[in-house]
Image: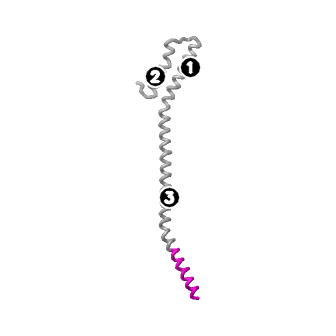
């Protein structure tokens, strides 16, 4: 009986030590959970900032590309008009050759808001 009582006492002491260890580890686990949550929130905020910045820069790029596209379209349209007029025998020469340059300059001036 003494052996069994000693065995039960040892078992009880082991359980108390285990409980003490678990109680000591709870704050560590809680702190780890808190840090992981904070890191996830920071990572999400960084991703959201990258996406917002990309959207703003894409809009800025589109705003810069618009006037350039107008100039290119004006040059293509003027060039096609000059070729069509030359094919029909409606003129050509210096006046028709300077038309694309005049149209592109006018388009650039209008696109940049420099028109007087």
The residue nearer to you, when weighing 8 against 42, is: 8
Residue 35 position within the rendered picture, expressed as x and y whole percent measured from the top left: 47, 59
Residue 62 position within the rendered picture, expressed as x and y whole percent measured from the top left: 50, 35
In the image, what residue occupies the spot 48% across and 51% down?
45
Q: How many marks?
A: 3
The local crowd at label 1, few if under 14, some if 14 to 19, many if 20 or more residues have their Cα within 10 Å, is few
In the image, what residue occupies the spot 50% across and 51% down?
44
Residue 109 is left or right of residue 79, and the answer is left
Residue 95 position within the rendered picture, expressed as x and y whole percent measured from the top left: 49, 13
Identify the residue position indicated by label 3 in the image: 37
The residues bearing labels 3 and 1 have C-alpha atoms spaced at a distance of 62 Å
**Quarter of the figure with residue 9:** bottom right
Residue 4 lies within the magenta run: yes
The local crowd at label 3, few if under 14, some if 14 to 19, many if 20 or more residues have their Cα within 10 Å, is few
Q: Which residues are magenta?
A: 1-19
Q: Which mark is residue 105?
A: 2
Identify the residue position indicated by label 1 in the image: 80
Say which element carries label 3.
helix
- Colouring used for the render: one colour
Identity of the residue furthest to the left in this view? 116
In the image, what residue occupies the spot 48% across and 56% down?
39
Identity of the residue furthest to the front in this view? 3
Callout 3 touching callout 1 (CB < 8 Å) = no
Say which element carries label 2.
helix
């Amino acid at each position: 009986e003494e052996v069994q009582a000693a065995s039960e006492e040892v078992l009880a002491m082991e359980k108390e030590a285990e409980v003490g260890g678990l109680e000591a580890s709870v704050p560590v686990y809680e702190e780890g959970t808190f840090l992981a949550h904070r890191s996830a929130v920071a990572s999400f905020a960084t991703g959201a900032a990258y996406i917002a910045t990309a959207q703003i820069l894409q809009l800025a790029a589109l705003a810069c590309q618009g006037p350039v596209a107008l100039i290119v379209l004006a040059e293509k349209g003027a060039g096609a008009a000059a070729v069509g007029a030359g094919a029909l025998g409606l003129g050509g020469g210096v006046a028709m050759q300077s038309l694309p340059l005049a149209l592109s300059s006018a388009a650039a001036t209008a696109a940049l808001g420099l028109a007087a």
